[in-house]
Amino acid sequence: MIKIIHLTFVLLAFSSFIGRVLLPLTHPNLLNQKAFKIAPHVIDTLLLLSGITLVFQGSWLSGEYGWLIAKIIALLGYIGLGGVLVMRSEGTTRWLAFAGAIGLFIYIGIVAVTKNPWFFL
Ligand code: HEM
């Protein structure tokens, strides 16, 4: 059940990130609405809380948790690129950060499924 909630927030977080990057280009006025400012933070917090709940529910800390550490490090990179650099830069830097953030998001998802941080080797 919690996993379904977690996966729902994974999809919501991904859509809200893409929305925050594309909406200013297509509907700049929408971003001034309160709901569009608050929603991403609510979604990201619930994604994190559902992930932490899964860690305890699955007793992941007493087993093999290397994949979890990789996930959290990649999450920090995703926050840095997606939450900070994309929102505060312009031009090529912004789009490179955008591509990097999406790459890290996909990496996090694959690591979650394979439980192997080096799945690409
Ligand atoms: C961008 C953020 C995240 C993405 C894209 C993501 C993605 C996923 C996916 C796709 C699964 C399903 C794996 C499966 O069913 O095989 C999953 C499960 C899980 N995630 Fe996340 N997650 C994210 C954030 C987090 C965070 C922040 C934590 C913990 C602090 C976390 C902890 C877990 C745990 C413990 C599971 C359960 C693994 C299992 O029982 O097989 N996730 N995540």
Image (cartoon, rainbow, N blue to C red):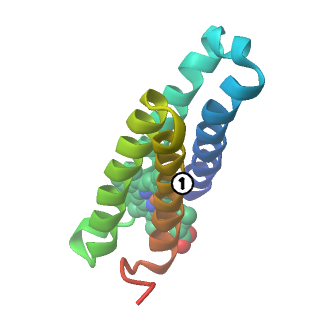
Residue at 39 percent of width and 34 percent of height: 84
Q: Quadrant of the N terminus?
A: bottom right
Residue 59, quarter of picture:
bottom left
* 72 vs 2, nearest the viewer: 72
Percent across and percent down for residue 57 are: 39, 59
> What x and y, as percent, mark residue 11?
64, 49
Q: Is residue 11 above or below residue 16?
A: below
Element under disc 1: helix
Relative height, residue 84 to residue 50 (above, below): above
Q: Residue at 61% of width from left, 34% of height from top?
A: 21
Instruction: Tell me if I can see residue 65 in this picture.
Output: no
Residue 34: horizontal and vertical position, in percent?
61, 9
**With 26 as the anchor, is 90 left or right in this view?**
left
Write down the residue under mark 1: 99
Depth check, front residue: 16 or 10: 16
Which image quadrant is residue 22 in? top right
Q: Is residue 101 above or below residue 66?
A: above
Quadrant where the C terminus sits is: bottom left
Q: Residue at x 45, y 72 (%)?
A: 111
Question: From the viewer's perspective, is 55 left or right of 18?
Answer: left
Mark 1, residues whose alpha carbon is within 10 Å: few (<14), some, or many (≥20)?
Answer: some
Query: 43 or 119: which is nearer to us?
Result: 119
Q: Visible in this render: residue 36?
A: yes
State the image quarter where residue 40 is shown: top right
Q: Residue furthest front?
A: 92
